[in-house]
Image: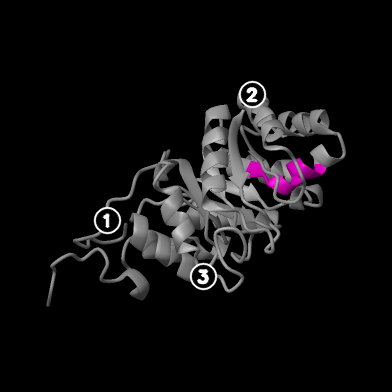
Amino acid sequence: MNYVLNNIPVRTEKPRASGLTMVMDKGLSIREVEDFISANSDFVDIVKLGWATSYLTKNLAQKINLYQDAGIPVYLGGTLFEAFVIRDQFDDYRKVVQEFNLSFVEVSDGSITLSHEKKCDYIKLLSKEVTVLSEVGSKDAAKIIPPYKWIEQMQKELDAGSWKVIGEAREGGNVGLFRDSGEVRQGLVEEILTKIPEEKIIWEAPQKEQQVWFVKLLGANVNLGNIAPNELIPLETIRLGLRGDTFDHFLGDLKL
């Protein structure tokens, strides 16, 4: 840091097992990736190439190499996994993972109908080869999954070999964990946390108000995902109580 401030929360250090920030790259150029790494590499833990944007991204191998050379793992969005599976091309998907030397993958079923048993089979198989993140929740705002089902699916996916489970919110933060207004389904989150350890969950929280809510609930080292590249340092200030939204949260009894 550039100067000393007291009463700042202690952040976990990279490589982190908790306090993770997953950034969503929705199509950054090579120049933008270089600039992003230069300014933000200390604060980003994982980069997701959103949904199936990697299918269209120019210089994909170069982009992935830039992130990896900076010590930042990259994975392809879960929607791409689903696009391969629905076309009966799972083996081709594995070849893509190998071709681009990816050490992380995301397994999801937010856009396709897939039995949970089959989803866990994919997790078991892939976890023997790479680190698996699996996403729970639907991208369909009309599909409301009861809390017990979230818990059951998260636990089974962790048991199958997922490193972390991801709470679905999409890039807009208006489905899954959140109402269409962006408001957190507070009861859902709190019930999940009665059974699933918080360090095992990455909460997709693209909106500032959502990030603030999770930091106030779980502290500076909550795992958060689907963060826009230009919102990474702003998020870090929220984590550290250096933005108005959380300014008083970590001060304790400190008064003027």
Give percent across and percent down for residue 250. 25, 63
CB-based contact (under 8 Å), mark 2 and mark 3: no
Measured as percent of width and height from the top left, residue 34 is found at 60, 53
Q: Is residue 75 above or below residue 145?
A: above
Residue 82, picture quadrant: top right
Expressed as whole percent of the image width and height from the top left, the position of residue 84 reads 81, 39
Amino acid marked by disc 3: Glu
Query: Which residue lies at the image location 61% right of the left edge and 45% below the top edge?
Result: 135
Classify mark 3: helix, strand or loop: loop
Closer to us: mark 2 or mark 3? 3
Residue 89 lies left or right of residue 212; in this view the side is right
**What is the span of residues highlighted in magenta in the rendered image?**
75-83
Whether label 1 touches label 2, CB < 8 Å: no
- Asked if residue 239 lies left or right of residue 189, the reply is left
Does the magenta segment cover residue 77?
yes
Nearer to me, 230 or 19: 19
Residue 178: name its quadrant. Answer: bottom right
Q: Upstream in the sequence, badge 2 or badge 3? A: 2
Residue occupied by mark 3:
183
| In this view, the mark in front (1 or 3) | 3
Which quadrant: the N terminus?
A: bottom left
Give me the C-alpha separation between circle 1 and circle 3: 26 Å
Per the image, label 2 sits on a secondary structure element best described as loop
Q: Which residue in the protein does label 2 denote? A: 129
